[in-house]
Amino acid sequence: MRILLATDAWPPQVNGVVRTLTHLIAELERLGHSVTVLHPGLFATIPCPGYTEIRLALGAGRRIGAMIEAAGPDAVHIVTEGPIGLAARRWCLRHDFAFTTAFHTRFPEYLAERHLMPARITYAALRRFHAPARGVMVATPTVGRALASRGFANLRSWTRGVDHERFNPSLRADDMGLKRPVFLSVGRIALEKNLAAFLALDLPGSKAVVGEGPQLAALKRRFPDAHFLGRRENGALAGLYASADVFVFPSLTDTFGLVMLEALASGLPVAAYPAPGPIDVIGDSGAGVLDPDLRSAALAALAIPREQCRAHALRFTWPECARQFLEQLCPMNEK
């Protein structure tokens, strides 16, 4: 098939949506499909308020129709609800072209956390955005049930994967230069990631954070004993996962949490709240501990065998992610 993806999330952004798209495209092309991506790099952009690393496309509405027609897609998938996603949606509706969407990010909770807008208003806008889609792809059953309870329809499952070669227990280093046990968290350093809940815990050893974001300076001042390691990628990040002792995932708003899979593939047990994302990724696998008391979860996770974490992560693959994506697409000849 000729598949067109319309996304407002694209490199140099570093997040789960971008990582998912990168692996998905590679798998689709490996299977012989042709993929066209409409992304912010094709347009003039401005920074998103509060998320300066996210670039918002300007003029997408004027140009995107010609770009879609030039691509001649068999199927259109709208990844995000930003300017590019809105423009692609408008074109599809105008031309009676069936399309699918995905729910990647719980923006209503993010905005409500910042006291910018009540979640019910944002959910109403998102419900209208996704309503015409022939399928709305969601990463976990928990998120699907939550959206269904808010009136979203045509929900379809679409899992995620992890690179088992890149993230591997064999990369473990005995000496990290930090006092053990090392409790590690990886992700964007922003209010919605709830990192303060992790950093405030009374834990033995060391607390380490990998990532960048708008809360970095404030958290450094508030928690001077924590180790902020900055942005790490590829081999350096994989080595940190493999070398730490527990991965702490304090987020209450993620729809999945790819970083948990990366940690598990590295043999690193997870401690998290029983929230969407961890409930589905960890569940009753024994590869992590879910507890409303995050300190208890972190300490209990120290006893989990690392091979158990790796075995659970092997269930999640990018080929399976691509297979499910293709299954949920709505090509025009199936309209």
Image (cartoon, rainbow, N blue to C red):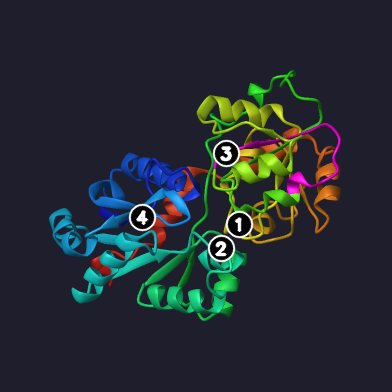
Toward which corner of the image does residue 260 lie, by quadrant? top right
Which of the 4 image quarters holds residue 172?
A: top right
Relative to 65, does residue 169 appear above or below in the rendering?
above
Secondary structure found at label 4: loop
Marked residue nearer the N-terminal end (4 or 3): 4
Report x, y in % for residue 123.
Answer: 50, 75
Q: What is the distance, in whole Å, between disc 4 and disc 2 at their CAs?
A: 17 Å
User: Callout 2 environment at 10 Å: few (<14), some (14 to 19), or many (20+)?
Assistant: many
Question: Which of 335 and 57 lies nearest the eye of the viewer?
Answer: 57
According to the picture, the residue beneath numbered tag 4 turns out to be: 8
Q: Residue at x 63, y 22 (%)?
A: 171
Q: Secondary structure at mark 3?
A: loop
Residue 320 lies, with reference to residue 173, above or below; the image says below
Amino acid type, mark 1: Glu
Q: Which one is earlier in the sequence, the residue at label 1 or at label 2?
A: 2
Residue bearing mark 3: 211
Q: Is residue 267 above or below residue 301?
A: above
Residue indicated by mark 2:
110
Q: Is residue 218 above or below residue 280?
A: above
Image coordinates of residue 93 in percent, x first then y, are: 25, 75
- What is the three-letter code of the residue carrying label 3? Gly
Is the residue under label 2 in contact with that under label 1 (CB below 8 Å)?
yes
Q: Residues within 10 Å of mark 1 (few under 14, many from 20)?
A: many
Q: Which residue is mark 1?
A: 192
Range of residues picked out in magenta: 198-212
Viewer-nearest of labels 1 and 4?
A: 1
Q: Is 242 left or right of 8, judged from the image as shown?
A: right
